[in-house]
Image: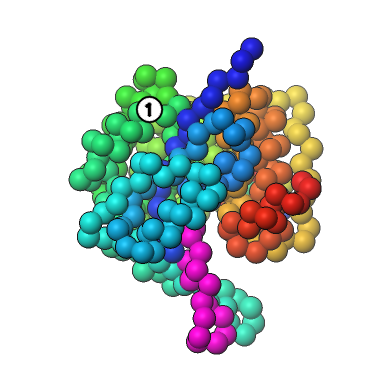
Amino acid sequence: MQRQRKKIACVGEAMIELSLGSSEGAARVGYAGDTLNTAIYLRRNAPADHDVHFVSAVGQDPLSDRMLAFIEAEGVGTAYMRRSPDRVPGLYAITTDDAGERSFTYWRETSAARTLFTDDAGETLAALSGFDIVYYSAITLAILSPDARARFFDWIDGFRASGGEVAFDSNYRPKLWPDVATARREVETAWRKCDIAFPSVDDEMDLFGDVDAAAVSARLEGYGLSYGALKRGGEGPLPIGVTLPVLPSYRRVDKVIDTTAAGDSFVGGFLAEHAQGRPIDAALLAGHDCAARVITHPGAIVPRDIWFSEVS
Ligand code: ADP
């Protein structure tokens, strides 16, 4: 049977990343954000004839131009990125103290991405309706205005009813939400409206106060989740909604360099298999293998030359 070519959108916010060294004279500029990280690892894992797009809003400034060029150089589509006339991308700086401990400082409250699904709602949602799979996270939800969030949820209902698949990861960042009750309410709504679920045990316990992984699973089952992966760090993921006679054999990384983007890259690897119609055990293993590679490198995005020269 001929494989169907899939169109997949990752929706969210990407920021400019400044990595500051010890001297004042120089900073390294990068671009990152959970859903962009997923788009990039999905693109690196999916067959070339699948379309992967990043959908967000940026400005019309030179740094936005450079961010788009970076995304396009990864083969990720930017045709549905909105260019705000009066806003610019969010920014964060990474500084490292004498003990090697990293700190993150953010300037993101007025980023262009915060206007997603506001003025542009009709146009961007209409564009998303042309995709087969739409992926977003709780960070995407947190940066949207309450109106935009409600509009997006309504759109999801119609998209799913017409056969589209929605994938969601609850990446919980307390500082992005006005309070825990709002975060719980919105994330629960998102779980109830998703086809492919990517919860992680830690995020779910932090947000919902579950006592252990079994309690997380029981609560999620109650929402009727029927497919996906419960991420459990180095233990490897459990399937959701499907019983496997044996779990895939997950390799554990003992020398972890940096866990940034572990969950994001897991989703990229999983979705690349799922989009090709492969079974869940193959998707779980591909997600795990992708994340296990990423955490042996510093930073969210392993440079392309290193990624493609490595034998996985
Ligand atoms: P999140 O970052 O979303 O909270 P996890 O911490 O569970 O999620 O990590 C995401 C994925 O990264 C895991 O499902 C697993 O596949 C992989 N992973 C994390 N830590 C390790 C490790 N020590 N060895 C191998 N894989 C790992």
Nearer the observer, 286 or 76: 76
The spot of residue 215 in percent (x, y) is: 57, 41
Residue underneath mark 1: 130
Q: Position of residue 305 (x, y in %)?
A: 67, 55
Q: Does the image show residue 157?
A: yes
Q: Name the residue: 30% across, 38% down.
A: 124
Height in image: 273 above or below 111? above
Q: Is residue 104 visible?
A: no
Mark 1, Cα crowd under 10 Å, few <14 / some 14-19 / many 20+, is some
Q: In front: 198, or 210? A: 198
As shown in the figure, which amino acid type bears the numbered disc 1? Gly
Q: How many marks?
A: 1
Q: Is residue 238 positioned above or below 292 on the image?
A: above
Looking at the image, which residue is at 39% across and 24% down? 160
Find out whether residue 190 is within the magenta segment. Answer: no
- Percent from the top left, x then y, of residue 260? 59, 59
Residue 155 in percent (x, y) is at 30, 31
Q: Secondary structure at mark 1?
A: loop
Q: Nearer the viewer, residue 68 or 198?
A: 68
Label 1 near ligand 1 (CB < 8 Å): no
User: 280 above or below 31?
Assistant: above
Residue ID at (50%, 87%): 24
Q: Considering the image in quadrants, where does the N terminus appear?
A: top right
Question: Colour scheme used in the picture?
Answer: rainbow
| Residue range (magenta) | 17-32
The residue located at (70%, 29%) in the rendering is 281
Furthest toward the left, the residue is 119
The residue sitting at the top extreme is 1
Residue 21 in magenta stretch: yes
Q: Main secondary structure of the magenta part?
A: strand
